[in-house]
């Protein structure tokens, strides 16, 4: 029962997100609807988290979480009803036909979904409080909010030991505290359900976008590879924010890719909003916003259309303002920059041993990424060499822009390790795998969007 | 032919990896963890202590073996985990390392406790919650 309640408590936000995005980006082709369902999961939960934060700041009352969700859902339903003729959800405009190959891949995907749900529940039931980061950072902060009541701002006290990261953005902690307030108890099924929603959001988004840009068969293969990467199923019930950040990195990359194809400014606005929510999720998201701004400038320059910076800025404005307020007025100093006893920046940057260690750990973690018994990277590289790349020439700018987002983020992580005041070996060991995971779904999207699809291969 | 084989291998390989992970984890299945995992147990251990703390206490001290014993006489990972678990259990009370606060939690081995108590003044109220956990109230 508590598992079901954990899922139900976030359902209004998820549905509201999907319905609102359907209004902003009309169209009801099946792949597009799948993208919108995926996008709606993260953007709906993100919007709720930010509005809940504002309601706490303004009214200092914790009980507003359900009210905010219901208002958003009512708005989504009202708009969907009003625009049902111009922008229907059903029936699909295209006749859906499934080939024998697609049926086989669909069966394989269905089997893996069942296996993954089994894995999810084994993890969730045996780890009710999630992983170390969950009880050290996110659920701990949620307890400060939920138990603290009107004194919820204690969660940002500079007295809190640095290791608890009281400066971390509040996406997850607020949604967990809000769910506990709605349910009236500290049910650990709520953060686990939150993780499951983000996991399914990633799957829908990845598969919808690959189906939209390539074929159904290719999207099923992408879904199979994602779910076949054990770390993803493990991350759902871990109750940490890395999966949520993965979602927003993927969403931003896909929205930029789709913009380059469709030239709809609303897609760039949503990309700006999604990147802002990445920064509301984890501190790494702040670096991500920088990476996305650079990519946006690159696209604007390539397309000789500086006007796209306006919708992007509009999308980023609301989450950006909330994060700025949080970082300037509430959050204590970040441990990476508050430590005054560290060696000088010049010393750190000129220490070649640090470069060697970081480089070798990056290689090791990438090659063996995924908590798998085989190297998923090697498997995908061999697959790429056999099946061959087949990118569309018209997508050239999109590939470059999206790859540059991931590259800037990747090198940003490298730079942060270079200047970290903490023991480098400890810092790499405890975080690098999660950082790679944050970029993995977006990299998978670019991978499958650029490869020959099964339909073409089996037609020959 | 090779391309078709690669697609089949990728699809089946993904299923095998997913199933392998499920089997591996299912073998570790222990129904006791559903309600009595390490974190829930620590929460329960701290519940009495939490109830004894006055409601107006916002910050308490924390002394562990890592504050008393030389390196090598304790396991750092255990000390760190128990400190984090204590903060998690007692939130929203802030746990500060050291014994400067009026209220202090001791999480000490007998040897570390003996060393610590010798450096303390008389007249402190020390409540034993079992399993090496004590709550100290300084006058």
Image (spheres, rainbow, N blue to C red):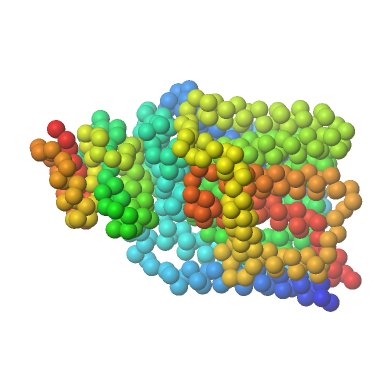
Quarter containing the C terminus of chain A: bottom right
Q: Is residue A199 left or right of residue B105?
A: right
Q: Residue at x 57, y 28 (%)?
A: A324
Does the rendering let one see residue A217?
Answer: yes
Quarter containing the N terminus of chain A: bottom left
Q: Nearer the viewer, residue A353 or A330?
A: A353
Give percent across and percent down for residue A360. Answer: 62, 59
Which image quadrant for residue B6? bottom right
Q: Residue at x 41, y 52 (%)?
A: A129
Q: Residue at x 65, y 40 (%)?
A: A288
Q: Is residue B6 above or below residue A46?
A: below
Q: Is residue A444 left or right of residue A155?
A: right
Give percent across and percent down for residue A317. Answer: 66, 28
Give percent across and percent down for residue A248. Answer: 64, 44
Q: Is residue B83 above or below residue A151?
A: below
Q: Nearer the viewer, residue A1 or B87?
A: B87
Give percent across and percent down for residue B49. Answer: 22, 44
Does the rendering let one see residue A13?
Answer: no
């Amino acid at each position: 029962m508590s598992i079901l309640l954990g899922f139900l408590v976030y359902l209004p936000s998820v549905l509201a997100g999907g319905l609102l995005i359907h209004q902003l980006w009309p169209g009801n082709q099946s792949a597009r609807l799948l993208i919108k369902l995926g996008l709606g999961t993260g953007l709906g939960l993100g919007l709720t988290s930010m509005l809940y934060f504002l309601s706490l700041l303004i009214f200092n009352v914790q009980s507003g979480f359900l009210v905010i969700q219901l208002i958003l859902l009512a708005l989504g339903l009202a708009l969907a009803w009003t625009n049902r003729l111009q922008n229907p959800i059903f029936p699909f405009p295209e006749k859906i036909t499934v080939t024998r190959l697609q049926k086989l891949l669909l069966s394989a995907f269905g089997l893996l979904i069942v296996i993954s749900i089994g894995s999810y529940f084994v993890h969730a039931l045996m780890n009710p409080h999630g992983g170390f980061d969950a009880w050290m950072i996110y659920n701990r902060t949620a307890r400060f909010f939920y138990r603290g009541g009107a004194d919820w701002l204690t969660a940002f006290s500079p007295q809190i030991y640095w290791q608890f990261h009281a400066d971390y953005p509040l996406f997850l902690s607020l949604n967990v505290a809000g769910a506990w307030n709605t349910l009236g108890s500290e049910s650990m099924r709520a953060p686990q359900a939150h993780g499951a929603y983000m996991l399914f959001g990633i799957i829908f988004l990845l598969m919808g976008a690959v189906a939209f840009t390539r074929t159904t068969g290719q999207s099923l293969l992408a879904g199979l590879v994602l779910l076949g990467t054990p770390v993803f199923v493990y991350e759902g019930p871990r109750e940490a924010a890395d999966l949520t950040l993965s979602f927003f990195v993927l969403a931003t990359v896909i929205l930029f890719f789709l913009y380059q194809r469709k030239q709809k400014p609303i897609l760039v606005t949503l990309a700006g909003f999604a990147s802002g929510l990445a920064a509301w999720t984890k501190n790494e998201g702040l670096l991500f916003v920088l990476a996305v701004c650079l990519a946006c400038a690159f696209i604007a320059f390539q397309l000789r259309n500086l006007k796209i910076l306006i919708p992007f800025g509009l999308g980023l404005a609301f989450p950006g303002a909330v994060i700025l307020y949080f970082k300037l007025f509430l959050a204590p100093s970040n441990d990476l920059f508050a430590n005054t006893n560290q060696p000088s920046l010049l010393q750190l940057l000129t220490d070649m041993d640090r470069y060697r260690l970081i480089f070798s750990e990056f290689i090791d973690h990438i090659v063996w990424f995924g908590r798998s018994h085989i190297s998923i990277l090697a498997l995908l590289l061999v697959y790429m060499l056999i099946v061959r790349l087949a990118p569309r020439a018209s997508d050239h700018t999109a590939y470059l822009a999206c790859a540059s987002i991931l590259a800037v983020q990747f090198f940003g992580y490298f730079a942060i390790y270079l200047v970290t005041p903490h023991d480098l070996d400890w810092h790499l060991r405890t975080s690098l795998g999660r950082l790679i995971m944050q970029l993995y779904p977006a990299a998978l999207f670019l991978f499958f969007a650029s490869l020959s699809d099964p339909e073409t291969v089996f037609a020959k | 032919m090779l391309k078709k084989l690669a697609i089949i291998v990728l699809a089946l390989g993904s299923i095998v990896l997913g199933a392998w992970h499920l089997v591996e984890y299912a073998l570790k299945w222990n129904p006791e963890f559903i309600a009595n995992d390490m974190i829930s147990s620590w929460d329960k251990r701290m519940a009495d202590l939490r109830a004894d703390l006055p409601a107006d206490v916002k910050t308490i001290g924390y002394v562990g073996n890592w504050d008393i014993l030389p390196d090598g006489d304790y396991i750092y990972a255990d000390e760190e985990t128990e400190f984090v678990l204590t903060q998690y259990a007692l939130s929203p009370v802030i746990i500060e390392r050291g014994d400067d606060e009026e209220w202090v939690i001791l999480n000490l081995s007998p040897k570390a406790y003996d060393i610590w108590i010798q450096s303390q003044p008389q007249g402190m109220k020390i409540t034993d919650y079992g399993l090496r956990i004590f709550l100290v109230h300084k006058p």
